[in-house]
Image (tube, rainbow, N blue to C red):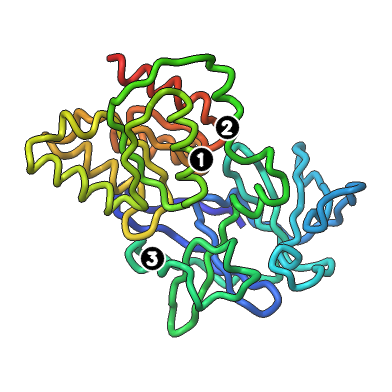
Amino acid sequence: METKILLENGTNELEVLEFVVDGNSYGINVAKIREIIPYQPITPVPNAHPSVEGIFMPRDDMITAIDLRNCLQRGQSNPGGLFIITSFNKLDIAFHVDSVIGIHRVSWVDIIKPGATVTTAEDGISTGIIKIDGKLIIILDFEKIITDINPETGLKVTEIDSLGVREETSIPILIAEDSSLLRKLICDSLRKAGYDNIIKTENGEEAWEYITKCRDAGTLDEDVKLLITDIEMPLMDGHRLTKLVKSDDTTKQIPVVIFSSLVNEEMRKKGEDLGADAQLSKPEIGNLVKVIDELLSK
């Protein structure tokens, strides 16, 4: 099963694939999916994490298979079912699921933040919940699942050290990032790189409200010199935010950097069409600082 991203740019919508693990419905952003294939025999890896089933080669590339049932603390999966092969953060990973239900097109506004409705096992690896025909579908945080299994796949904060000693600057940088952990890591990294005036927001809507407040007050040039945004965020995603910024004559001069695990070839084209000044994959925190340096020196 091949997947295609059919959405227009900047509509604040996403397509969610609903799948089943141990009788429960979960979701993944279709933009993360490369393909869906039947289960294939895999080769176990010695001393691997309990959630790593092993490796296999569906074509010419080697792919690691992750047992989602194990990640959700529901035991081990049996042979059978499907592999959802994903591509994000420059990694190709197969997630073992029982079955696939279908694709739902939803707005980011309709995604409920996780709370008391999710169980303890899912609480830390859920980014949101959608309600379809009375049924709750938990959208899983696949980046966190992978980072928990192998921390080296996450944000490479140590890259900042290689930049050496840098001068501090009070240039205001606005960040839109819904993950509190990533928001802290990005802010800590930027401060370490000398950028100590950081305005933090949790989604595109909050960031756009801040920008328009500064614009209406006539202080935009002093208060926002650059915007860093994730793509996947509740209420308003990064593509919609980029579109709003770049289609408004009073805000389009703000450099926009998309910093997301979803920056692949197809999503990069979307970002370019919307006017993003730069796009980087999440692990590249060192490159993020270099890009910020370049954009702010223009």
Query: Quarter-wise, where is residue 41 in the image?
Result: bottom right
On screen, residue 16 above or below 294: below
Percent from the top left, x then y, of residue 228? 36, 36
Q: Decide which of 133, 231 is in the foreground and name it.
A: 231
On screen, residue 159 above or below 186: above
Using the numbered discs, state the Cα–Cα distance from disc 3 to disc 2 in whole angstroms: 34 Å
Report if residue 199 is visible in the image: yes
Residue at the spot of label 2:
157
Residue at the spot of label 3:
106
Q: Is residue 81 left or right of residue 234?
A: right
Q: Decide which of 164, 153 is in the foreground and name it.
A: 164
Q: Is residue 41 left or right of residue 256?
A: right
- Say which residue appears at 48% left-offset and 72% top-offset: 115
For the N terminus, the quadrant is bottom right
Q: Earlier in the sequence, mark 3 or mark 2?
A: 3
- Say which residue appears at 40% left-offset and 54% top-offset: 233
Query: Is label 2 in contact with label 1 (beta carbons under 8 Å)?
Result: yes
- Say which residue appears at 43% left-offset and 51% top-offset: 232
Percent from the top left, x then y, of residue 4? 49, 51
Specify the amino acid type for callout 1: Leu
* Mark 3 element type: strand
Density class for disc 1 (Cα within 10 Å; few <14, some 14-19, many ≥20) is some
Using the numbered discs, state the Cα–Cα distance from disc 3 to disc 1 in whole angstroms: 29 Å
For the C terminus, the quadrant is top left
* Mark 2 element type: helix
Q: Which mark is residue 185?
A: 1
Specify the amino acid type for callout 2: Val
